[in-house]
Amino acid sequence: MISLEVCANSITSALAAQEGGAMRVELCDNLYAGGTTPSPGQITTARKLLHIKLYVLIRPRGSDFLYTDVEFDTMVTDVKYCIEAGCDGIVTGMLNADGTIDKERCTQLVQLAKQAGLGVTFHRAFDMCANQFQALEDIIEIGFERILTSGGKSTAMEGARVITELVKKAKGRISIMAGSGITEINAADLIMITGVKEIHGTLVAPLNSKMQYKNDHIVMGSTYGDEYGYDATSTERVKNLLKKVNEK
């Protein structure tokens, strides 16, 4: 059986993922920036409503994965909150300026989480590192349980060759989870090509606002967007993907 983790950008998405049959949720915020840490309120509410595994993204901002001391202190505090909230795991990753894995700081977060019984995933900072095969060994040594990767490309299908090599070199020592651009259309082919057992996706669909009055002459954010609609994970898309990748 192939396991699906849904990258949920809200409580609404997390619940849709659960209803659709996902085995785990990665709760985050600000998908447009690649994801950041969600609020304490979202984490607490998600834990209360979800019976599937809840992992939380520990990432204080978008952009690169080279963090200041203040940002790292924030990440430590967020991990402690996830422990207190009863989360099942965290998702994180840090790099040095030369593109290598920040082993010292990653080890601190992994040990903090694992001592409290939480699992730890290394996220797509992996795709931004200088040498992915050396990074694989470093991440295994640190004690992460899985790596989320698109093979160093924008989408997992583009990076399928590298993902295949990572699965082979991992030799079962760590799970390689393919993510980015995963859909009902390409998931089965990606799994067949790479040999991964876990996949990760948002599987969103647009939701329209129920507002009756609409001001169509204003933009609330820094870029143009629909002020009366947003994307959320679709239960049907989750169900359809799982049916396709696990059908005999």
Image (tube, helix red, strand yellow):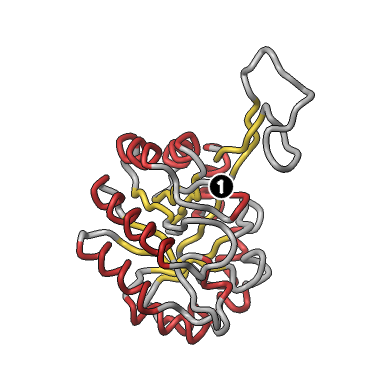
The amino acid type found where label 1 is placed reads Asn
Q: Position of residue 243 (x, y in %)?
A: 52, 48
Seen in the image, is 131 located left or right of residue 57? right
Residue plotted at (41% across, 62% down): 70
Residue plotted at (41% across, 70% down): 175
Which residue is tagged 1? 30
The vertical placement of 66 against 184, above or below, is below
The vertical placement of 213 against 235, above or below, is above
Q: How many labels does the image show?
A: 1
| Residue sitting nearer the eye, 152 or 243 | 152
Residue plotted at (57% across, 38% down): 232
- Determine the image quadrant of residue 57: bottom left
The vertical placement of 141 against 35, above or below, is below
- Determine the image quadrant of residue 119: bottom left
Q: Position of residue 101 (x, y in %)?
A: 46, 79
- Judge whether residue 37 can be spotted in this image: yes
Residue plotted at (27% across, 45% down): 85
Seen in the image, is 233 located left or right of residue 44? right
Q: Position of residue 215 (x, y in %)?
A: 73, 19
| Residue sitting nearer the eye, 5 or 185 | 5
Q: Residue furthest top?
A: 212
- Judge whether residue 165 can be spotted in this image: no
| Residue sitting nearer the eye, 195 or 100 | 100
| Residue sitting nearer the eye, 6 or 187 | 6
Q: Where is residue 30 in the image (x, y as percent from the top left)?
A: 56, 47
